[in-house]
Amino acid sequence: MTDVAAALPSAARAWPRKADLFGVRVSVTDYDEAVASILRAVRLGRPAVVSCHAVHAIVTASGEASLREKVNSFAMITADGQPVRWALNLLHRAGMAERVYGPELMLRLCRAASENGISIYLYGGTQQSLVQLCDNLRQSFPDLQIAGCESPPFRPLTQEEDAAVTQRIRASGARLVFIGLGCPKQDLFAYEHQEAIDAVQVCVGAAFDFHAGVKPKAPRWMQDRGLEWLYRLGHEPKRLWRRYLVTNTVFLGKLGAAMISRRPNNHETPD
């Protein structure tokens, strides 16, 4: 593996700083810093968890103390959605020019992995979507080493199944493990396995379905304007209407309350 991390600037040699958003510690970062930080952890052989949080994930974690404590222990939580980025800029003057969107972060990491001989593991999705995902990734990155992939059952794993999954991932030698189980299931899996899985786990949500071509991505103009939720709602109204109605409303309420209760500040805390 090329010694990429050793050549990185000193600012990229630690996990990005974080700022509080409704009790969730979100990383103030961009794609370059996020990728550099992950590559450094891979090179040093340091297990870590990275998760990409849009509005739904932020609201869910902010409302559940146990889940919030778990995700706040992660090395990095990126602002997956534009509203999350806007809120950080508004409340903390974070100056973030871009979000760090899970599907895009996954592609950038796969590109870096292919260039540096880093093997990856894919955990999540359906068996059919995983086959297509692997094919698409190999077409985009011919040198990418996919050490393994599997679709877990849509139910809690038994103790024996969990132990077997952990062993398969460890035995694969993968240094990057992408998890696409949705929120909060993927965060819980990563947290529970962060000591057992000797790799950097990256929770990327719907990225598996997008890159497999199973679900369409919103047009760029809608993504840039924070309207991706509306696009997804139009494609899956029965499944998503309640989520977006509730979480978007709660997010706006929390943001309004935060704006009233305190002035914009720079209380980022180092990780």
Image: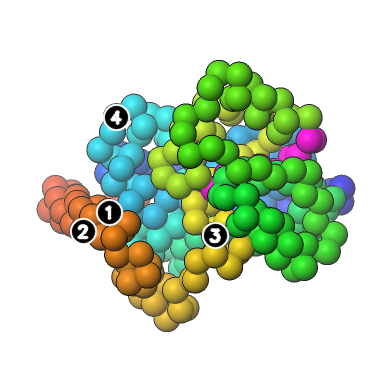
Alpha carbon of mark 4 to alpha carbon of mark 1: how far? 19 Å
Residue type for callout 3: Asp
Of callouts 3 and 1, which one flags the residue occurring earlier in the amino acid sequence?
Answer: 3
Marks 1 and 2 in Cβ contact (< 8 Å): yes
Q: Position of residue 196 (x, y in %)?
A: 64, 23
What is the magenta range? 172-180
Q: Which residue is mark 3?
A: 209
214 or 7: nearer the viewer: 214
Q: Residue at x 47, y 29 (%)?
A: 156
Q: Which residue is mark 2?
A: 245
Circle nearer the viewer, 4 or 2 = 2
Alpha carbon of mark 3 to alpha carbon of mark 4: how far? 29 Å
Q: Callout 2 environment at 10 Å: few (<14), some (14 to 19), or many (20+)?
A: few
Residue 60 location, quadrant: top left
Q: Residue at x 85, y 59 (%)?
A: 143
Of callouts 4 and 2, which one flags the residue occurring earlier in the amino acid sequence?
Answer: 4
* Left or right: 82 in relation to 238: right
* Left or right: 255 in relation to 134: left
Q: Position of residue 170 (x, y in %)?
A: 74, 29
Q: Callout 1 environment at 10 Å: few (<14), some (14 to 19), or many (20+)?
A: some
Circle nearer the viewer, 3 or 4 = 3
